Image (cartoon, grey):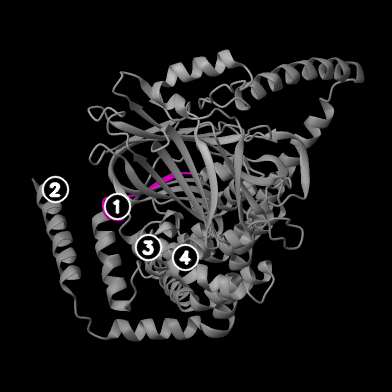
Amino acid sequence: MEEKKLDINSIIGFVLIFGILIFMFYQNQPTPEELEAQKAEQELIEAEAKVAEEEKESSPEIEKPQPINVQDSTAVSEYQNSVGAFGFTSVSEATTILENELVYLEVANRGGQIVEAKMKNFVTYDSIPVYLVKDGNANFKLSFSTTDNRVLSTADLFFEPSLTKNGDDQVLSMKAKVSENQFLEYRYEMKPDDYLIDFTVRSQGLNGVINSGHPITLEWDMKGIRHNKSVQYENRYTRLTYNHEDGKISKLSESSDLDEETEEDIKWLSYRQHFFSSILATDNPFNTAELTSKNLVEEENKETLFTKEYSAKVPLALQGGELSQNMHWYYGPTDVKILDDYKDLNLADSIPFGWGIFGWINRYIFTPFYGFLSSFLPYGIAIIIMTILVRLALSPVTYKSYLSQAKMKVLKPEITELNEKYKDNAMKKQQETMKLYNKAGVSPMSGCIPALMQLPIFYALFMFFPTSFELRQKSFLWAEDLSSYDTIFNLPFSIPFYGDHVSLFPILASIAIFFYMTLTTGQTMQMQQQPGMPNMKFIMYLSPVMMLVFFNNYASGLSLYYFISNLITIFIMLAIKNYILDEDKIHAQIQENKKKPKKENKFQRKMREMMEQAENQKKTGGRR
């Protein structure tokens, strides 16, 4: 009875503390005059900060050449003199459009590179088209030296475009010319209804122009453009991922301010922006690459425009004094169903399914299974059905765990008696307790093993929701987007670690996990608290609070899963307790087990012998 009172008082205490905080906010609100003065001061500060932030973010650090006025003959002449032999190319600041049903690309004459990449079928959280390249956030260039001692960058060179057709494919040839038959070419080939663009870099007749004694360096820089409602959540799954050393997949740090690596045998580089990716793949692996990833997100901020800044430097080798590298650009969704179409490049490995067996379960079980359910069910209902089936599949494990708890509860009086009898001799108490467990056929670890067996499932599902492209911008009940947080109330201020909004699904999940832990830890709390063991009552209250706080900015689909999962588990455990398990029968079975001779295994015998030796040494030492 006292336990129940304590639980109710604790709950009331939490409610009162929350109410007091709200009351303090209300009582300490400023007068109208103070508000007006604060408002004017705040507006001035915000205006200055916004200008500074816009200057910082709207002007990426990535270098962008200044346009040349082609009508200014002096400016054109200066450019031609600076690039030497490549001044043969006509000067034009125009762009050429490549597009199919999925992707819109603009390729600039200046630099010959993609200066705009837009998804035609997707929008951001605020209904703006999804751009992967826009307004100078990306730069692709080759740096090389010439035989007349110039150091040139293709970002500064002009290319002449030629758009043709190869069957249904669009072919764009961009040539930086030394003469009509001598040039550096970027060749883009776009297929219908395809996110992958074939990309070839080659030279013709430049063995006497490019200095073969100095390396040619491919450089690809990009700032990831924000697409999601929560920039911190999006940034958590925004990574530079790469395939190297014959299929090994590695990533640069997700959270550090700057991470740098030099790798070998690179097959592809993925600049992932959570649900969308920019990938450069090559048919002939790059020998080495210097990779960097810089984190640009410090806190949750609606004004933040970029998440990470990526860069790659790759030396390219000449063959017979000429350059030839067959590559591919991918601008599209980080969706396993799409990336699996490019099996020869293994692009689906760029998706963060999770490590080892966790990732295998996520990729080959949960992802296709959810895809099957969502093909004929609403997306939220598909999550609920998948959760129910997963919990039913794990119900035998739940039964084992609860059976172990029931056995420990039956043995509680005898354990208490041993604790009292040997309270001054910890070694003897432990020895006699193990004997009791062995005779009764009970293992104190039997409750932990079922829980450990469920960990791969839980972790795989934890990784499933952030990587499931199918959940993106799919609504359910009050949640507008199952891949982002739901909002039932916007706060006028931001709470550290919690945010500036209230999400309902984490609240429901927290309530469910509280009642679930009440069932699972109730028996443990009734037992005497062992020294050095965690306080179960504290954990019972802490877990729901952590769920409430940290999941407030997570995908609502994940919180929905935890809510339904814990709800179903509660019903399963109540059914086991009230209709399946009989404590009297368990007690009778334990008593029967104690009468039977029990054969020790090697481990049990070794543990008993070690304890007996320790006990004898203690007695011998005491007599001395």
Mark 4 closeness class: few <14, some 14–19, many ≥20 residues within 10 Å: few
Q: Position of residue 601 (x, y in %)?
A: 18, 75
Q: Quadrant of the C terminus?
A: top left
Residue 195 counted in the magenta span? no
Q: Are marks 3 and 2 in contact (CB under 8 Å)?
A: no
Mark 4 in CB contact with mark 3 (< 8 angstroms): no
Using the image, tell me which numbered label, if any, was put on residue 344. 3
Q: How far apart are labels 2 and 4 at the CA level?
A: 75 Å
Residue type, numbered disc 2: Gly
Q: Tell me what residue is drawn at x 60 percent, y 24 percent.
A: 59
Residue that carries the numbered disc 2 in the rendered image: 622
Q: Is residue 40 left or right of residue 519?
A: right
Q: Which residues are magenta?
A: 239-247
Q: Position of residue 481 (x, y in %)?
A: 69, 55
Which structural element holds mark 2?
helix
Sequence-wise, which precedes: disc 1 or disc 4?
4
Which residue is rendered at x = 43% and y = 33% of the image? 177
- What residue is shown with label 1? 424
Q: Is residue 109 left or right of residue 454?
A: right
Front in this rendered view, residue 266 or 577: 266
Secondary structure of the residue carrying tag 1 is: loop
Q: Is residue 246 magenta?
A: yes
- Which quarter of the figure has residue 515? bottom right
Of callouts 3 and 2, the N-terminal one: 3
Name the quarter where the N terminus is drawn.
bottom right
Is 287 in front, or is 39? Answer: 287
- Report which quarter residue 212 is drawn in: top left
Return the disc, 1 or 2, that comes first in the chain's sequence: 1
Mark 1 to mark 3 CA distance (whole Å): 69 Å
Say left or right for 528 vs 470.
Answer: left
